Image (cartoon, rainbow, N blue to C red):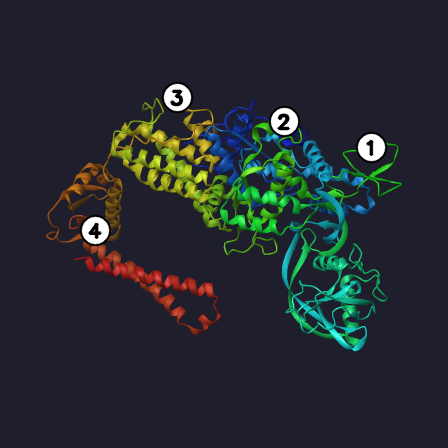
Amino acid sequence: MVTFVSLPPLEVQNRHGYTGLMSNPLSSSPHPIISLDQPLQHPALESMVRAKWEAHPEWAQPNGHPTFSIVIPPPNVTGTLHIGHALQHTLIDILVRTERLKGHSVLWVPGTDHAGIGTQTVVEKALAAEGHPKSEWGRDAFLQRVWEWKAQYGGTITSQMRQLGISVDWSRERFTMDTGCSQAVQEAFIRLYHQGLIYRGFYIVNWCPRCLTALSDIEVNHHETDGHLWHIRYPLYHDNHRTITVATTRPETLFGDQAVAVHPDDPRYRDVIGQSVRVPISGQIIPIVADDTVDPTFGSGAVKITPAHDANDYETAQRHGLSPRWIMNETGYMINCPPPYEGLSRERARQTLVDALSTEGYLDAISPHSLNRAECYKCQTVIEPYLSKQWFVAMSKLAPRAMAAVANGDIEIIPPRFEKPYVDWMENIRDWCISRQIWWGHRIPVWYDTQDPEHMVVAASPPNDGRTYTQDPDVLDTWFSSALWPFSTMGWPENTSDMATFYPTHTLVTGYDIITFWVSRMIAMGLALTDQVPFKRVVVHGLVRDQHGKKMSKSFGNVVNPLDLMTTYGTDALRFSLARLATMGGQDIRYSDDKVEAAAHFVNKVWNAARFVMMGVGNEPLYPLTRPTPHHVADRWILGELDDLIVSLNQGHATAHFAQTADRLWEFIWNRWCDWYLEMSKCHKGDSSRTLVYTLTQSLILLHPIMPFVTEAIWDTLLKHPQLAEELPPSISLAPWPSVSPNDHPEMPDVQAMKAVVTELRRIRKEVGISPGKGISVRVVAPPTEQQWLMQTLPYIQKLAKVDHLTFSETLDDIPQSATGVVDRIELKVPLADVIDWGEERRRLEKKQASVAQALAQVTDRLAQPGFIAKAPDHVISKMNEQKNSLSAEWAALSAQLERIP
């Protein structure tokens, strides 16, 4: 048993000014021993392989050849590895490792996001638990505590990423608030401001009354919920006997009403357009305006306009010259209202107002209405649409060029169906609110004269002009720094060698859920600040859901922890199963443990196949380890199949078709190489040693991007062979990607047909109960061509189907007591008189049939009980019906076998 001892992590600062935790280099440690003599043990093997990789970090660094660069979508520094990260990082690693094997100079930049609101919320809760809420801390002291927290806990997710085996260049690890990224953020803000692309102004924002900050759209969760429409009568100012009924989902905002709007063509209200109404309870006089955006079919066709607390109302007010009136403060409590509403919470004010409207006769009706409730993604507080003075990016000016980059092919989106949501978003984009009223984040580089706040300077530091300046207290939206990620990680705004060599990056891998919020902003900012697209290709994947298609959530109890799966099944099994699930269309992925378990069996199959090959070759000559000249049908066949696999994998890699790649590897390695070729090679003793080892090494290289641990471990064992040690590079990650030999495919017998014959003979043996060790005779009727290749593949048929004699006949009618099979134009007959004890076989089948009949009767009786059918869940009934059908089919098959017994 080999014991691997992890050394404690070191805190280091890399060349980008990022201070973080990195594992100690292990180059001074003895190289761990991995042996194929033992069964596969994932935890020990993975620790050994990680030790090898840590000892040689240069293997994941660029090597000067044609480049392929990619940046990791930065996970939150507060987070832990979840199944979505595992999927995304696995898919990127497949691309990266394949490109590296193809000889490209690959740069994969790792890093994490400071996650402004999320991190601040976590630290606030921790301080509150200590009895020292945030209100007791000044800004500087609080931020010091955040940095301390980040230093203590921030390396959790990067440590878990290492467990997943991703081959990033850790020497380039970045953090969105490291020195380099901070300089990039500052420079980007200043440049965009002076270009007129960043401005400050009033607009309706998503406001969290608990976090006391504006939120981006992606920081808001939406939930369908049952609500109400309150139908309120507004009396005409000059005619108290006539009212207009207004339908609203938020009666408490009535005190901020500045108008009632109707559609100009609505015949019900044409005669009152331009007149005024009196707002119930408040008594304020407001106009009736006509606006084309009003939906005459909604409610009564008349809507109240509250500019300070609704985005659509604000735009309507702008068109009609209406001023906003704030009736709620930043904490969600009522202001500028008459008693008794002043100072009430918005929820309490709603109930008090509805009661008053009902009492005074203004409430016409209350009807049920489905609401799309918006909540803060961190604290689940209901969002308040709030008119606030904020900083904005003029996305409407940046959008046309960003759309053109996709339309003209500068950026390819895979699959193409995700171009539409991207274009739709950009065509209808609103300016982006980038200011946040929190402390943790990039401080906005704007300075105000303390004596004259209207005097403002946008710069990295205040000017030395004799004035006293104070910095804007707000920080930038986390997504602002994330939008610069493809080039801020390369050293922009400096003209670094990384910018010159690796930018634009080649591929971005991301979920479809952030195409609009992140991908669109990266494209827009990249074009605006670097005059280049940030990446040439966007590969979009689906989201991981549970086996029923339901979103994973702690509240649902269906969250899957990838670390648990890696411990139980091995990291390679998790990676392979996720790759098989990542279909080309970008559909959501339905996870189940069964898929990971199946992948674990495949990993074991690879391990055991490698054991078989290396135990079999012994000291056979293997030099040189190039494509061998095939001397046997089996060798020629498997080399041709290997070529087909390489072609298929090259196509799958080019189109980022991960599932196709994984499925083809499974099909070749398990179904062709293991199940057929390894067995066929036994017919040639040592003659196939070089082909066995060659196909093993090539299969390992092709499999390595998806299953890096077991392939690296097997590679290590190959290096112990005295000849292979001189032939193979020290790591499989340094091996060359296999190539195809198109001129090495001579005409050969139909191996696929031979496999079909063997399969049919195995079926006959199983169906009639011939013991595995008993040899059989086979009589064949076949056309001349089939007879020819049958004779050429006869050694394999004899070995794999345990055939002692195979003879050709004109007819099979004269063979009594025999079993028959047909493969295409070939008829097979197996005489049974000398290979089966018919009495014993009849007793065996009858006993089995009786057992099946008993089980069938029990299931049938259960399904016939009305009480059971009425009470049992649908899935239980469905499963029992499936069981009944399966037992019925088995009983019929046994009956057919009994009928054939003489």
Q: How far is the residue under mark 4 from the one under mark 1?
A: 93 Å
- Where on the picture, by quarter, is residue 510? top right
What's the residue type where badge 4 is placed? Gly
Q: Residue at x 39, y 39 (%)?
A: 648
Amino acid of disc 2: Thr
**Which of pointers 2 and 4 lies earlier in the amino acid sequence?**
2
Tag 4's secondary structure?
strand
Name the residue carrying label 3: 722
Q: Position of residue 800 (x, y in %)?
A: 26, 41
- Of residues 66 and 358, the one nearer the viewer is 66
N-term mark: 2 or 3: 2
Relative horizontal placement of residue 620, taking residue 26 as reference (left or right)? left
- Please indicate whether residue 776 sits to the left or right of residue 349 in the image: left
Residue at (68%, 67%) from the top-left corner?
A: 264
Q: Residues within 10 Å of mark 1 (few under 14, many from 20)?
A: few
CB contact under 8 Å: marks 4 and 1: no
Q: Which mark is residue 463?
A: 1
> Which residue occupies the foreground of this view, 799 or 140?
140
Image point (40%, 69%), residue name: 863
**Marks 3 and 1, the one that precedes in the sequence:** 1
Report helix, strand or loop for mark 2. Answer: loop
Q: CA distance from mark 3 to mark 1?
A: 70 Å
